[in-house]
Amino acid sequence: MTRTGGEPVIGTDEDPARTTTAGAPKGRRIRIVGAVLAMALACAGIAVGVPWGQGGGSAPSKAEPKAKTVEVERIDLSDTRSLDGTLGYGTPQTVKGAGEAIVTWLASDGTTVTRGKALYRVDDREVPVFYGTVPLYRRIAGRNTVGRDVQVIVDNLRALGYDIGPQPLPGQVVGVTAPKDGSGPAGGKQDQEATPSKPASPPGTSPGPDSGASGEGSPDPRTPASGASGSDRDSPAEGAGAKGTGTEGTGAPVRKAAATEQVRVKSGDGVLTPALEHAIIRWQTNRGVPATGVIEPGDVAVLRGAVRVDSASAQVGDPASEPLLRVTSTDKAVTVPVDASERGSVKRGDPVTVRLPDGTSAAGKVAGVGTDADEKEGGGPGEPKVTITVSFTDPDKVKRLDSAPVQVEFVSETREGVLAVPVTALLALREGGYGLRIAGGRVVAVETGLIAKGMAEITGDGIAEGTAVVTSS
């Protein structure tokens, strides 16, 4: 519709396309109203969800996950610590010789040496291994010499198959005979006049019958305490170096007079009886060495058992009195260096678990705790270390490994039959301490004890085995 003159009429009621809001087209009015409503709801704090992909700028909010529950368990709880160790044959020990001899041969690295076998040679004479804990610290000679070192000879010759005859019992008194010049059991050279005129027995034969034992010097003369009887009372076995009061044709004595001392045998002592002297001579004869019936300190190497040669400390031509070899046990073991201050926390016999390089584990126990702190293993001054030695319950577990780095788990504390929950179930309380949320119920305060391997020992009112509690994972 136009006014007179041809100009259009704007904003009149009759114009269907007027520009006011009320007169806007239907589709446009809907869009405007929707926008105003959304703004109002947003101002009121009410979230408006918009379907993803239809004009929204973010994904819809996710539903809160349901809480997970676990049951309170009754278990044995142990606290462990893991330390680095080395699999091998244990801590080496040094073997020294004795005397003024010269080393002429040493067993090679890796060799296993058992009782009676040669560990090294001095002056081209074999020095065999004897098992024991007391070294030979003196010359073993003189009738009825008594001591723990003599017991080492007794034990080893018997184990090697030699008949050493009966030994006096602890508490018996024996007459120890030695020449007046001081030779014999106290040390020093044996008197040359002590050698009888008879020649030594042929190699491989008995030097003579083992004499019976009288009771010389013993409380009961009928008790075989002194190891001498009859005509052999003052004479040992016939053979090179044997001592006695023997005569030559005319019956004249061939040695100096001897002094006798009464000695009481103690527990752990051995006695150099005539029968034992016989056994020593037979052993020497079989080895191809002079059959004197006397054993010097450097004639054998006394060790705790069979050994494996780790390395040589000397060379051929060195004096025998120097360190000669480093030897270890023949059994596999693990050595673990620990701070000297922590030595008291580990005890001999404590159970351990050894984690091997292939991921398997082997049970073991503490076989020894070192007493000498070594700063070399500690990384410098202020960090001295001692060595813990671990043996295996089943050595076959490591028979294919000679050496390897391992982890050793030591048990420091064990609590048996305690109530425990995962550490993730514990709630820190505002007033201090910890609590547990009972499934579908309240929070209960609890006391915690040992915490190990992700589990916590707990006690509290209403907490029992099987109680369901909420945990975060």
Image (spheres, helix red, strand yellow):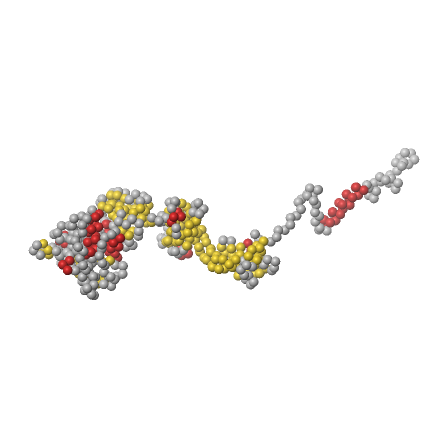
Against 438, residue 43 (above or below) is: above
Question: Position of 306 compared to 192: left or right?
Answer: right
Residue 261: image x %, image y %? 19, 61
Determine whether, in the image, residue 406 is placed left or right of residue 445. left
* Residue 231 visible in the displayed image: yes
Is 417 drawn above or below residue 359 in the view shown? Answer: below
Give the residue at x 53% y 60%. 465
Residue found at the very far left of the displayed protein: 250
Residue 160 x/y as whole percent: 25, 51
Q: Residue at x 52, y 57 (%)?
A: 73
The image shows a total of numbered marks equal to 0
Residue depicted at 46% across the width and 54% down the height: 80
Percent of width and height locating residue 109: 32, 43
Q: Is residue 30 left or right of residue 318?
A: right
Instruction: Check the image and name the residue furthest to the top.
Output: 6
Quarter containing the N terminus: top right
Identify the residue at image location x=41%, y=54%: 351
Task: In this rendered view, identify the residue nearer to me: 217 or 395.
Answer: 395
- Left or right for 368, reference 418: left
Foreground of the two, 435 or 359? 359
Whether residue 174 is visible? no
Residue most toward the right? Answer: 4
Q: Eyeballing the image, is 57 above or below 279?
A: above
Image coordinates of residue 292 in percent, x first then y, are: 18, 51
